[in-house]
Image: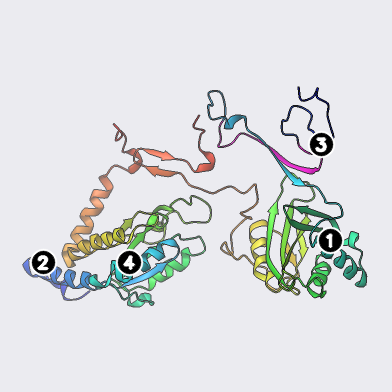
Amino acid sequence: MGIEEKLPSGFLLTSVEKLAGYFRKGSLWPATFGLACCAIEMMSTGAPRFDLARFGMEVFRGSPRQADLMIVAGRVSQKMAPVLRQIYDQMVEPKWVLSMGVCASSGGMFNNYAIVQGVDHIVPVDIYLPGCPPRPEMLIHAILELHEQIATMPLGSNRVAAARAAEEAAMTATPTSAMKGLLR
Amino acid sequence: MSDQTGEQAGEQPGGGLPVTPAAEAQIVDVRTGMFGVRGPGDTSGYGGLVRTVAMPAPATRPFGGYFDEVADRLTTALAVAGRSFDGCVEAVVVDRDEMTFHVRREHVVDVCRQLRDDPDLRFEMCVSVSGVHYPHDAGRELHALYHLLSITHNRRVRLEVSCPDADPHIPSVVEIYPTADWHERETWDFFGIVFDGHPALARIQMPDDWPGHPQRKDYPLGGIPVEYKGATIPPPDVRRAYT
């Protein structure tokens, strides 16, 4: 990306990380993908009662090229899936995806031919928010969790190391369907 | 005991149990059980439920309300246009304060034109075109329903056109009711009824290359098993019964 890619891991890179993370999370502009009922809750989160402007996110960009965070709010149908992918591809790095509601996270109550069973089939998701629809407070909580992730995001050589470590962990982790014996 | 007191006209024989009245013409289906309840040990009672799904019988004159006037006017208007009412309309069904004309598919355009243009009929608005699939009704599997509204006279009427699955063609009424454009596209998308003469009959809800027609009765639900920690729950149409 920039100067942070060339800094060796150490005190200077950590300071740059902290600064960049602070600015990125302080003004994270959402690109709305308000599709269904969750869009109403997203709108009311931007409205005065559950203000998103206090987190610097009141400006919902219409153009994906000017946005950082894509909030997929609602059911994604089979017909909408390529459109979603195209909007995601048009966003500029660094970008994050928040799948809002159960329909975006896993298909929700619609386990049928017409609805994509989770937008993680189409775009990489950073944070999943369950709810049908999630209350505005829940959406704000998810956004603040994402802010924490963004603020502590490693850059440069630290990022490469972190990606490698995450891959190692994922390769040796137990798959979900094999996690038996939890209901004791 | 109720039999011995003498059966007057109108009293039901058999002790008051529900009897399918002779007026019901067409039994579509007899469904037993509900909520997938099967086998012994059923305390809910849903396992023994028997439901007869029946279509109402064709109605006889007088129909009641404004239905007679509409049928008379339609007969006259069709006669002026050189068609006979019985040649165009197979049956008239009046049920729950609603009138349905079962129209032969070759004549649906003529009937719609008369319904729209005649001053005493004036059904200007086609509210929707929808479809139904009756898989057991050989030769008449696919039905298209046209709901018409007369704003001038505050009346509603329904047209029902049937076609076989082997030859699913119905003439399009877009030239008379332009609003039927997208409705007919939807009916094509979900049932496979081809509307001849439609300007651009393409899928409207499903992606353009989707195989099959989803709202037919034999189309699967298409769900996937849901994965939890240590368990997998199958989609709702293939789950086991919980009794």
Give, as a three-letter code, the residue at label 2.
Thr
- Which mark, by number, is residue B10? 3
Q: Give the labeled residue for mark 4.
A: A45
x, y percentage for residue A150? Answer: 22, 65
**Point 30% across, 74% down: residue:** A58
Q: Nearer the viewer, residue A134 or A173?
A: A134
- Which mark, by number, is residue B68? 1
Give, as a three-letter code, the residue at label 1.
Asp
x, y percentage for residue B100? Answer: 77, 57
- Which mark, by number, is residue A14? 2
In the image, the segment drawn in magenta is: B20-37
Mark 4 or 2: the one toward you: 4
Per the image, label 1 sits on a secondary structure element best described as helix
Q: Are marks 4 and 2 in contact (CB under 8 Å)?
A: no
Asked if residue B129 shows in the view, the reply is yes
Per the image, label 3 sits on a secondary structure element best described as loop
Q: Residue furthest front?
A: B5
- How far apart are labels 3 and 2 at the CA level? 92 Å
Mark 1 / mark 3, whichever is N-terminal: 3
